[in-house]
């Protein structure tokens, strides 16, 4: 692995973490396309660069995290995901992440759901401020489906909130902010599991570069996506997911 690989993976992480196209699927496919072996360092690298995406959320929505009501909403959404993620940790890492078919099918199925939901012409009128704690729990349960690689954490949260009547741009922003505790907890758990991993100076450089690139790209990716959803639908993302899913069926 080189600094170029680290930069490219940082771009992929930053672009895909907050778009409804599954960062996990893209990171796996990106690594394979670059011919990178799934070493302990690569696994560690892919986890740690998520910190860049996490800081991008903090930087973009810093003031909102002082809203006590929002903090409660995020907590109630985070807990169901945390419990399910913790209980299924070994299955996720040893079975789900190794199944190319599962990832491909998840990409295709959720892509189809995007298209179907957009044709339903839902009444989207609610804002995050109107969210009840019961609704926050439901959103958290929906987010838990993202333990299946290819589903997309952001995508499933946005879909659930649209079905519950929330404006799509509000849903996107909530999915970004919910990423903070979710990604932080997942990254912390992975780092603890990999705490015996020792890094060379070159590897430390790659981690710093990848994390920095992920931060910059994620920041602009989030801003662009919110603006996009105020004017356009998710249909294009659905078509993209289906296309990538079909391609990945033949991708080993």
Image (spheres, grey):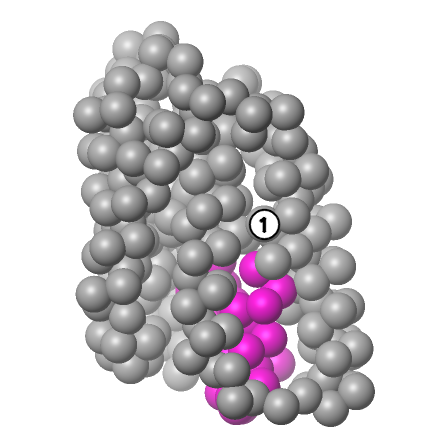
Q: Which residues are magenta?
A: 23-50
In screen coordinates, is 216 left or right of 27?
right
In screen coordinates, is 10 left or right of 143?
right
Q: Position of residue 63 (x, y in %)?
A: 63, 25
Q: Position of residue 16 (x, y in %)?
A: 54, 52
- Image height check: is 188 above or below 21? below
Q: Is residue 36 magenta?
A: yes
Residue lying at 61% horizontally and 51% vertically, measured from the top left: 53
Residue 2 occupies quadrant = bottom right
Task: Determine if residue 173 is in view.
Answer: yes
Residue picked out by circle 1: 54
Q: Main secondary structure of the magenta part?
A: helix
- Mark 1: give few (<14), some (14-19) or many (20+) Cα within 10 Å: many
Residue 1 occupies quadrant = bottom right
Residue lying at 59% horizontally and 68% vertically, measured from the top left: 48
Quarter of the image where the C terminus is located: bottom left
Residue 24 occupies quadrant = bottom left
Q: Position of residue 225 (x, y in %)?
A: 57, 33
Q: Position of residue 147 (x, y in %)?
A: 29, 59
């Amino acid at each position: 692995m080189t600094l170029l690989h680290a930069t490219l993976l940082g771009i992929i992480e930053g672009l895909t973490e907050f778009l409804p196209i599954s960062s996990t699927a893209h990171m796996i496919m990106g690594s394979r396309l670059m011919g990178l072996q799934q070493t302990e360092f690569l696994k560690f690298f892919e986890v740690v660069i998520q910190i860049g995406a996490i800081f991008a959320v903090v930087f973009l929505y810093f003031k909102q995290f002082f809203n006590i009501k929002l903090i409660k909403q995020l907590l109630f959404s985070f807990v169901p995901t945390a419990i399910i993620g913790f209980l299924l940790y070994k299955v996720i890492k040893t079975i789900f992440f190794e199944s190319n078919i599962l990832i491909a099918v998840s990409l295709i199925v959720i892509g189809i759901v995007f298209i179907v939901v957009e044709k339903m012409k839902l009444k989207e009128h609610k804002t995050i401020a109107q969210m009840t704690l019961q609704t926050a729990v439901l959103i958290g349960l929906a987010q838990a489906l993202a333990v299946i690689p290819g589903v997309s954490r952001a995508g499933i949260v946005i879909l659930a909130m649209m079905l519950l009547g929330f404006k799509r741009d509000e849903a996107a922003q909530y999915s970004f902010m919910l990423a903070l505790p979710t990604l932080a907890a997942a990254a912390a758990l992975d780092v603890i599991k990999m705490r015996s991993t020792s890094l060379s100076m070159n590897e430390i450089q790659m981690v710093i570069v990848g994390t920095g690139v992920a931060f910059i790209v994620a920041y602009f990716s989030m801003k662009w996506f919110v603006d996009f959803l105020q004017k356009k639908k998710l249909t294009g993302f659905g078509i993209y997911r289906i296309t990538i899913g079909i391609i990945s069926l033949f991708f080993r």
